[in-house]
Amino acid sequence: MAANLVCTGKSDLLVRLSTIAAENYLLDADAVHDGLVERERLGPTGFGGGTAIPHCKVAGIDMPVAVFARLAKPVDYDAVDDEPVDLVCALVSPAQDGASHLRALAEISRLFRDEKFRSQLRGAADSAAMFALLTLSEERDAA
């Protein structure tokens, strides 16, 4: 989780997300970065509404993991609506995973479609407040 992440553009953002994923989940940053870049070559993962969900699959993990970032300044991302992106959730799943990867993508996209939720994330004071919003959302949906 990163609040007010500073990056110079999409390429820099993908590097930073890969590094954060590697540090938090003991992954190979290069493998994550290569996976994210390869997925972007298939088509941009800019979801619209200032959001992006870069994602990939890598070896060495047993379940999907995510890195959420709110950018200090939006960056051009080739999103479907041509708007710059400031809310990003990078999803990294096990190499042989299909079903849980798709479920996680669906859940993230559902959250990002909610304009009120996006506004709350943008207005959150810090990483702890963003984490609380994301956690409350998970708990609410599980009930």
Image (cartoon, rainbow, N blue to C red):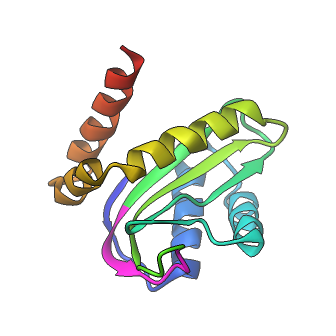
The C terminus appears in which quarter of the rendering? top left
Q: Is residue 119 left or right of residue 96?
A: left
In the image, residue 105 above or below residue 50:
above
Instruction: Residue 85: give x, y in percent of width and height.
Output: 41, 73
Residue at the right extreme?
96
Image location (x, y in percent) of residue 50: 38, 69
Vertical placement of residue 1 versus 45, above or below: above
Q: Looking at the picture, does residue 26 appear above or below residue 3?
A: above
Toward the viewer: 126 or 133? 133
Question: In terms of image quadrants, where is residue 103?
Answer: top right
Residue 76 part of the magenta-drawn span: yes
- On screen, residue 9 versus residue 34, left or right, reads left
- Quadrant for residue 3, please give it: bottom left
Left or right of residue 20, residue 100 in this image: right
**Magenta segment:** 70-79
In the rendered image, residue 105 lying in the magenta stretch gets the answer: no
- Give the camera-side residue of 9 and 42: 42
In the image: residue 135, left or right of residue 90:
left
Q: Name the foreground residue: 45 vs 59.
A: 45
Magenta-drawn stretch, dominant element (helix, strand or loop):
strand
Q: Position of residue 109 (x, y in %)?
A: 49, 48
Residue at position x 70%, y 71% from top? 43
Q: Residue at x 69, y 42 (%)?
A: 93
Q: Position of residue 7 (x, y in %)?
A: 42, 79
